[in-house]
């Protein structure tokens, strides 16, 4: 409970508005999830300003507001302070001193959440224990959690996390622990702290803060944690599997119901508490061998507080996995799911894989997502997991861009490709896995917070109602760590839109027609690798690119589907094409002989598709040249005439007569070839417009381009209902300024303010593909309204007029293509502004603009 008077005393703030209510049940900083009576905290962060949402929070029932800038005439108490985050810390310190609970501080790279749960369970048998949720364990979250602290709590078990140097020291100063527990130092937080040595130094600040009559409970098996005993005058209790620890576990016996082991007390002898045996059998329902450390830490803290041994045993036996912490759930097809979706690091991934290996199963399946915050260890951390998985899993599914490294390492370690599935979306993972699950299958699902692997778990559940047992991250009291681009201008790609669009096209063309996903120009600016995987996972069977280098990039990313280079491949690249098993477009006899020579030299087959120019005037043989050409090259060694195709020039125009004429010419070529006994495995001519308008053009393969990306082929060829664009282009406001009348804006002084105008600067320019001339974007979206561009577009910056849009701030999201609020700027609308086509608009977004999936 939060008392208004405590807040005013602790923070030195001033109250504006009514004096009631005097109490608030909890803090909340997300107005979308405010509950009646809660105190809304308006926090200004790197990504937004909570002051913009005060009115919304009050309208939805907030009982009060803690803020730096109060609204006019508030209807609820507003506590005004210079800094809301500092005020929360001041209040937390005040409440901890007021209620005086003994604090058990728990930190470590991994294992601290489970340790806190186990310690709390053990102490609760005899004490009134408060414990903070794991998502509220840093210097901002911990104060918010203390709203649940009451005078009745005599012990507070606090998980302490950090993402910056000095944070553990500040939390220790705030909480003043009597007992410090350090679980492990391993490869987590490396993105912030840089090295294992730095992590150990930071975590050890908790031990340094102990009073002389305190207790340090340390994992003896971790060398860096063990060394922390030299950093305190408090009594040290160590635990581990080593016989040199004070509390020792042996004879570990994991089973489907949990873990059983023997505990010994060579170094503590019960600390004077009667009833502690020299050794004892211990059982817990926590899953995995690694949980022995969780239980030993809880036993050690139980000893410190003289909890009777039988009470410790009872508490430990009743421990159950928390949400997303290897909780066993019923999966589709009478399978079992080991839900490890709460978080992940290399160490916890390996622990979970060991738990899966120990679990009795017909098939062991691992669905593994990205791991974040690994810094320079990111590649090796993922690869280490892949090597471990390859040793025993029957099927490996990876989800995410970084998780591809897991699949790569597993493949190198000998896991066959047919036992791996790589995807970037939860829906793809579920669509692939759910139909094949059966009795005896055990599925481990694990990934870091950003990977949100709970979506995979939910999709695999036998009973959807069991979703209540899953990790829930989107609570206004909790913060969710999400991936951010490394630039304030970025493109968001909705891969589920790609997947849906491809599946719909597959339904339209039918099972007998193959889909070639056109991935030219980095998949029309959408990101060729992720789009290729997604398209292939949802019905495409072929990839099409413009040039060999695009094909090689796909191959080096692990794409093993057939790839057709639709453009010109010179003779000097023939060997490279064969080395990467790439199919080539052919229309020239000299190229045919070059491809044949390369195939013979390398003892490989050069697969080619013959290009016929039926009226485009671009690459290809004229119709009357095709038969003589085929007769000339048909018997060249190493050359396989796999396919034949043509390209329509006006299939997206209202009048289809020319397209039908082209089709007739192509059919005549096919008939002539049949007369000399030549047929092809693949025959294709339909682009998106043709496949939607003229079913007779589909033959046995179609080339899916624009429609796959949710873009209209033209105003005359609308997409079927349900198709949606996959690309949204965004930036953010870098600066806002008010200029007086007569001020010039940007190069050339082409724009001059007519009155007092509010101008926002956005960090996007022509070097990103945001065109400068001869025509340009007319407007962008800010706070759901259109803001016109003023002055010339610069290389990296553009100015917009936001005079008519209230409260525009630095950091506000700006949409260049896509929807914001009730308005939308489509690629088609931008194409009209620029006098071009939507192809060009999206394909011109340069590579330096990061793609976020």
Image (tube, rainbow, N blue to C red):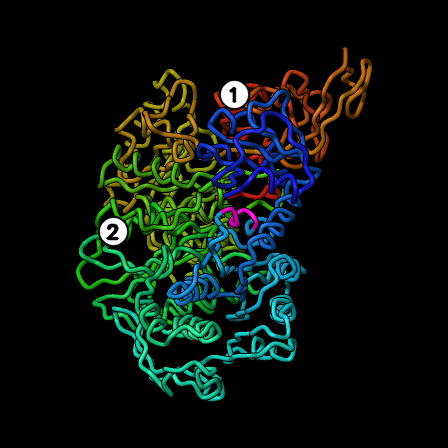
Q: Nearer the viewer, residue 435 or 137?
A: 137
Figure quadrant of residue 312? bottom left
Magenta stretch secondary structure, dominant:
helix
- Find out whether residue 582 is within the magenta segment: no
Q: Is residue 114 left or right of residue 208?
A: left
Residue 826 position within the rendered picture, expressed as x and y whole percent measured from the top left: 50, 24
Look at mark 2 in the image and give the residue it sits on: 434
Residue 839 visible? The answer is yes
User: 192 above or below 295?
Assistant: above
Q: Is residue 803 left or right of residue 564?
A: right
Instruction: Report the residue at 37% width, 65% height from top.
Output: 125
Figure quadrant of residue 116? bottom left
The answer to whether the residue labelled 1 contacts the one labelled 2, judged by CB atoms less than 8 Å apart, is: no
Instruction: Report the residue at 66% width, 33% height from top.
Output: 80
Residue 364 position within the rendered picture, expressed as x and y whole percent measured from the top left: 28, 66
- Neighbours of disc 2 within 10 Å: few (<14), some (14-19), many (20+): some
Q: Nearer the viewer, mark 1 or mark 2?
A: 2
Residue 353 position within the rendered picture, expressed as x and y whole percent measured from the top left: 37, 68
Residue 530 position within the rendered picture, expressed as x and y whole percent measured from the top left: 45, 47
Q: Earlier in the sequence, mark 1 or mark 2?
A: 2
Look at mark 1 in the image and give the residue it sits on: 829
User: Helix or strand or loop: what does disc 1 sit on?
Assistant: helix
Q: Nearer the viewer, residue 643 or 124?
A: 124
User: Helix or strand or loop: what does disc 2 sit on?
Assistant: helix
Q: Is residue 369 left or right of residue 835?
A: left
Q: Nearer the viewer, residue 178 or 661?
A: 178
User: 260 above or below 104?
Assistant: below
């Amino acid at each position: 409970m939060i008392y208004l008077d405590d807040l005013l005393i602790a923070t030195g703030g001033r109250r504006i508005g009514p004096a009631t209510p005097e109490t608030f049940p909890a803090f909340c900083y997300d107005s979308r999830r405010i509950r009646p009576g809660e105190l809304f905290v308006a926090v200004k962060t790197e990504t937004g300003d909570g002051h913009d949402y005060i009115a919304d929070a009050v309208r939805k029932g907030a009982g009060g507001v803690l803020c730096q800038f109060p609204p006019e005439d508030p209807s609820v108490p507003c506590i005004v302070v210079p800094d809301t985050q500092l005020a929360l810390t001041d209040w937390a310190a005040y409440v901890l001193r007021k209620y005086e609970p003994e604090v058990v501080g728990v930190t470590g790279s991994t294992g601290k959440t489970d340790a806190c749960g186990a310690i709390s369970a053990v102490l609760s048998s005899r004490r009134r224990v408060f414990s903070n949720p794991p998502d509220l364990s840093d210097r901002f979250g911990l104060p918010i959690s203390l709203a649940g602290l009451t005078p009745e709590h005599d012990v507070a078990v606090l998980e302490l996390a950090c993402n910056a140097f000095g944070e553990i020291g500040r939390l220790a100063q705030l909480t003043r622990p009597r007992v410090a527990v350090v679980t492990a130092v391993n490869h987590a937080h490396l993105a912030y702290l840089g090295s294992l040595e730095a992590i150990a130094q930071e975590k050890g600040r908790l031990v340094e803060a102990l009073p002389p009559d305190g207790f340090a409970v340390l994992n003896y098996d971790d060398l860096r944690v063990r060394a922390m005993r030299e950093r305190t005058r408090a009594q040290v209790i160590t635990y581990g599997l080593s016989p040199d620890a004070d509390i020792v576990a042996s004879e570990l016996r994991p089973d489907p119901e949990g873990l059983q082991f023997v505990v010994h007390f060579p170094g503590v002898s019960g600390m004077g508490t009667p009833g502690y045996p020299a050794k004892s059998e211990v059982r817990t329902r926590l899953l995995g061998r690694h949980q022995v450390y969780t239980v030993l830490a809880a036993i050690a803290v139980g000893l410190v507080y003289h909890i009777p041994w039988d009470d410790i045993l009872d508490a430990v036996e009743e421990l159950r996995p928390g949400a997303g912490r290897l909780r066993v759930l019923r999966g589709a097809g009478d399978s079992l799911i080991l839900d490890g979706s709460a978080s992940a690091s290399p160490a916890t991934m390996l622990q979970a894989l060991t738990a899966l290996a120990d679990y009795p199963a017909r098939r062991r399946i691992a669905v593994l997502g990205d791991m974040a915050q690994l810094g320079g260890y990111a590649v090796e951390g993922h690869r280490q997991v892949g090597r471990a998985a390859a040793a025993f899993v029957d099927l490996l599914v990876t989800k995410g861009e970084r998780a591809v490294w897991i699949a790569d390492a597993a493949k190198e370690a000998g896991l066959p490709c047919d036992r791996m599935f790589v995807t970037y979306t939860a829906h793809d993972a579920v669509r692939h896995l759910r139909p094949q699950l059966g009795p005896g299958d055990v599925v481990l699902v694990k990934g870091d917070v950003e990977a949100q692997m709970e979506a995979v778990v939910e999709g695999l559940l036998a009973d959807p109602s069991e979703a209540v047992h899953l990790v829930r991250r989107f609570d206004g009291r909790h913060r969710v760590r999400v991936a951010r681009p490394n630039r304030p201008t970025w493109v968001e790609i909705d891969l589920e839109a790609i997947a849906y669009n491809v599946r719909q096209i597959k339904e339209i063309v039918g099972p007998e027609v193959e889909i070639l996903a056109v991935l030219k120009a980095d998949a029309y600016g959408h990101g060729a690798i992720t789009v290729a995987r997604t398209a292939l996972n949802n019905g495409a069977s072929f990839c099409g690119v413009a040039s060999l280098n695009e094909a090689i990039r796909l191959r080096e990313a692990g794409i093993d589907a057939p790839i057709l280079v639709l453009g010109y491949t010179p003779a000097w690249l023939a060997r490279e094409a064969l080395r990467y098993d790439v199919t080539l477009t052919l229309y020239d006899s000299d190229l045919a002989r070059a491809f044949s020579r390369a195939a013979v030299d390398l003892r490989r087959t050069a697969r080619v598709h013959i290009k016929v120019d039926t009226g485009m005037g671009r690459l290809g043989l004229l119709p009357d040249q095709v038969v003589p050409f085929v007769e000339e090259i048909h018997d060249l060694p190493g050359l396989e005439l796999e396919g034949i195709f043509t390209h329509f020039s006006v299939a997206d125009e209202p009048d289809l007569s020319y397209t039908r004429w082209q089709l007739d010419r192509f059919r005549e070529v096919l008939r002539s070839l049949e007369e000399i006994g030549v047929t092809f495995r693949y025959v294709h001519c339909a682009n998106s417009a043709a496949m939607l308008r003229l079913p007779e053009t589909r033959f046995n393969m179609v080339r899916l381009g624009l429609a796959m990306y949710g873009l209209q082929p033209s105003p005359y060829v609308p997409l079927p209902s349900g198709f949606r664009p996959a690309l949204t282009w965004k930036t953010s406001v870098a600066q806002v300024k008010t200029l007086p009348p007569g001020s010039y804006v940007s190069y050339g002084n082409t724009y001059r303010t007519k009155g007092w105008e509010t101008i926002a600067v956005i960090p996007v320019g022509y070097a990103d593909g945001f065109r400068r001339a001869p025509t340009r974007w007319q407007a962008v979206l800010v706070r759901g309204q259109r803001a016109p561009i003023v002055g010339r577009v610069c290389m990296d910056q553009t100015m917009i007029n936001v005079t008519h849009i209230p409260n525009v701030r630095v950091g506000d999201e700006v949409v260049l293509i896509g929807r914001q609020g009730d308005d939308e700027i489509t690629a088609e609308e931008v194409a009209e502004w620029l006098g071009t086509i939507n192809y060009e608009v999206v394909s011109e977004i340069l590579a330096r603009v990061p793609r976020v999936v």
